[in-house]
Amino acid sequence: MWGLIHKLGSPKWFYQLSARLQPWCWGAAILLLVTGSVWGLFFAPADYQQGNSFRIIYVHVPAAFLAQSVFVTMAVAGLVYMVWKIKVADMAAAAMAPLGAAMTFVALFSGAVWGVPTWGTWWMWDARLTSMLILLFLYIGVIALRGAFGRRDSGARAASVLAMVGVINIPIIKYSVDWWYTLHQPASFTLTARPSMPLEMWLPLLIMVLGFYCFFIALTLMRTRSEILRREAKARWVQALIEEAR
Amino acid sequence: MTMASLVEWAAMGGHGRFVWSAWGVTAVFMVGLALHARLERRQLLRQLKRQARRQTPSPPRGPSHDPDA
Amino acid sequence: MTPTRKRKLLVIVTLVSLAAVAVGLSLYALRANINLFFSPVQIAQGEAPLERSIRAGGMVKVGSVSRDAESLNVAFTVTDYVDDLPVDYQGILPDLFREGQGVVVVGELQDDGRFRADDVLARHDENYMPPEVAQALEDAGYSPADFQAKAAEVGRQQEDDT
C-alpha cells in the first residue's frame, strides 16, 4: 500500500494513472447528472407541502455535501503535503479549492432561493447557515493565502495550515442542526439513516449526489494534471510528452 | 408531449423563478468550471509547445543558395 | 515514518486539536446565543428578555389558530408539548404555516406573557412526501399533525418492501 501511495506522489505516475481514470469519471459524471436531473425535474413527484420548489433539493443537497467533502479532502491533502512533503498533494489541494468554494456558494444560493417560498425568508443567522457562510470565507481565505506569497511553498504551507484548522468547521456544520435550535431542519438524507422520503424522491437525489462526486473527481484530476505540467515543465518526461503531442 | 404541457412544467406551479434560478446558477458554475479546466489545459499545452520549439536549435546553415551568387 | 515526520505530524495534530478545543469551549459558552430561538419552556422559565426583539419557536398547537374575520389579525399558540406561548400577529402568514407544523416567530415578549410577532416564519421538518401519499393519509383520516410521523413510517415501509 505504501508503494502505491509513494507512486501516486510521483507527478509522472499520477499524471499517467489519472489519464486512464479521467474519461471514466467524466463519463460517469455526465451520465449520472443527466439521469438525475431529468428524473428530479420531470419524473419525481413534487412535495405535498412545498410543491415544485422541492426540486431544488436535487442541486442544493449535492452541492452542500461536496462543499464539505472537498474541504475535508483539501485539509487532508494539506496535511500530507506538510508532513510528507508530497508536492502532488499540494497541487491537488490547489486544484480543488475553487470547486469547493463554488459548491459552497451554490448551496447557499440555492438554499436562499428555496427559503423564500418555504420559510418566508432567504436568510437567517442560524447555526447551519452561518457556519456554511463561514466555510465560504475559509475557502476564499485558502485560495487567497496560496497566491499571496512570493514563494510557492510558503503559500502552499499557509493554505494548508488554514485548511487544517478550518476543517474544525465541518463537524460544526454537520451537527449544527442537532446541537442547537435552528431554522434549517435536520438531515433528510445521510449515509447511515434511512431517508425520510419515499424511494421515488430519494433515488434521483442519490444519483445526483453520486454525479456531483464524479464531477469533483474528474475536474480535480484534470486541473491537477494541468498543474503538474506547469510545475514539471522542465522534466524530461514532460518534454517527451510535448514532443509527441506536436 | 405538447407545447402547453411543457410550458406548464417550466412554470413549476408558480415556483419557476425559484427552481430555475437555483438550477441555473448551479449549471453555470459546473459547466463554467469544466470549460475553464479544458481551456486551461489547452492553453498550457500550446504554451509549452511554443517554449519547446524556441529551445530547439535552428537547422545548420549550408552554403548560400542565392542563384545570382 | 521518519522521526522528523512523526514529530511534525504530532505538532500539527496537537495544534489542530487545541484549536478544536478552543472553538468547542467558545461554542459551549455561547450556546444560548447560538440557538436561533427561545422555546416555550425557556420563556415560561423566564429566560427570555422583555422589550427586546427575540425569536421564539416550536410547533403550532393544533386547534389554536384563530383569525379575525375583518382584519389580518391572527392569534395562535406555539408549543413544545411542555409549555405554551400565545402569539399575536398582524399580517399574511407564510404559505407553509399550518397547525401541527414548526414555526419561528420574531418579535417581542409582552408583560402579559403574550408574544407580539412582527414576523412569522414557517419551519418545516426533514420529511418529504408526494401529494398522493398525503391525500391517502388524509382520506384515511389522519390530520396534518400526524403527517410527519406517517411520512417517516411510509419511508420505513418502503425500505422494508425494497
Image (spheres, helix red, strand yellow):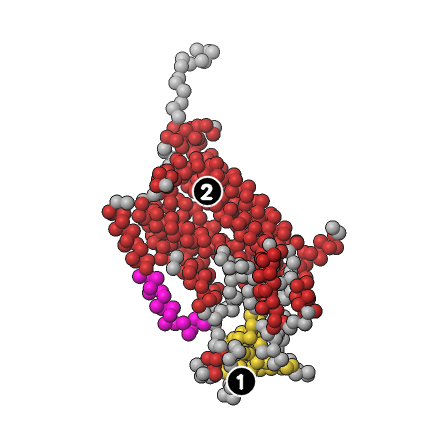
Q: Position of residue A65 (x, y in %)?
A: 49, 55
Image-based side of C127 in relation to C140, left or right: left
In which quadrant is the C terminus of chain C drawn? bottom right
Q: Residue furthest bottom?
A: C112
Determine which of the numbered discs, if any, sits on residue A221 in the image. Answer: 2
In which quadrant is the N terminus of chain C drawn? top left
Boundaries of the magenta span: C18-35
Q: Residue furthest front?
A: C160
* C13 or A140, nearer to the observer: C13
Residue beneath the point at 38% across and 45% down: A89
Image-based side of A96 in relation to A30, left or right: left
Few, some or many residues within 10 Å of mark 1 (<14, 14–19, 20+): some
Residue beneath the point at 39% across and 17% down: B61
- Work out whether disc 1 and disc 2 sit on a shared chain: no
Image-based side of B21 in relation to B60, left or right: right
Secondary element at tag 1: loop
Q: Position of residue A87 (x, y in %)?
A: 35, 43
Q: Position of residue A44 (x, y in %)?
A: 64, 56
Q: Is residue B32 above or below residue C24?
A: above
Can you identify the residue that label 1 sits on? C114
Query: Is there any visible trace of residue A32 in the rendered image?
Result: yes
* A17 or B2, nearer to the observer: A17
**Is residue C30 within the magenta segment?**
yes
Asked if the residue under mark 2 is in contact with the one under mark 1, i.e. CB atoms within 8 Å, the reply is no
Residue beneath the point at 61% across and 56% down: C161
**Amino acid identity at mark 1:** Arg
Q: Position of residue A125 (x, y in %)?
A: 48, 68
Q: Is residue A155 above or below residue B51?
A: below
Disc 1 chain ID: C
Residue beneath the point at 58% across and 44% down: A31
Few, some or many residues within 10 Å of mark 2 (<14, 14–19, 20+): many
Disc 2 chain ID: A
